[in-house]
Image: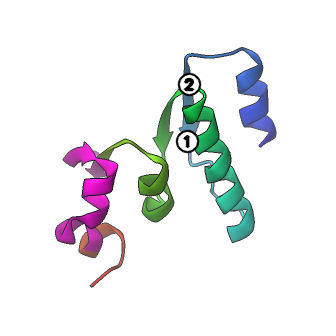
Amino acid sequence: MLAIARALVAKPKLLLLDEPSLGLAPQIVALIFKIVKAIAAEGTTILLVEQNAHQALRVAQTAHVLEVGSLVTSGPAAELAQDDTIRKAYLGVH
């Protein structure tokens, strides 16, 4: 959270976040994503790289799914979260 706050001091138009949930407790992860969503709602564009697909798709508008460095699919995050192929491969839903 401190790193995000330090970045926001500069009032960026674009905020790059690489795995902001890595190694954090679930309650803190939920808080981080709540903050990310609030930052985006205030008008800052966010490029989020995240392995926690559930959380990332909840806060994103658009998602790009990469596998071994190659683009698998792209589209509105809400649609990808409901796509059966994506759900099975990346979200652990069978």
Q: Quadrant of residue 92?
A: bottom left
Residue 3 pos. (x, y %): 75, 35
Q: Is residue 82 above or below residue 12?
A: below
| Color style of the picture | rainbow
- Residue drawn at (26%, 57%) of the image: 80
Magenta span covers which residues? Answer: 65-87
Tell me if label 2 and label 1 are in contact, CB under 8 Å.
no
Q: Which residue is mark 1?
A: 18
Above or below, 69 against 78 in this view is above
Q: From what the image shows, is residue 13 above or below residue 78?
A: above
Q: Image quarter for residue 69?
A: top left
Identify which amino acid the numbered label 2 is placed on. Answer: Thr
Residue at 71%, 25% in the rendered image: 7
Residue 25 position within the rendered picture, expressed as x and y whole percent measured from the top left: 73, 68
Q: Let me know if residue 68 is in the magenta part.
A: yes
**Which residue sits furthest front?**
41
- Tell me the quarter of the image containing the C terminus: bottom left
Mark 2–mark 1 Cα distance, whole angstroms, equals: 16 Å
Report the amino acid beneath label 1.
Answer: Asp
- Determine which of the numbered discs, if any, sits on residue 44 in the image: 2
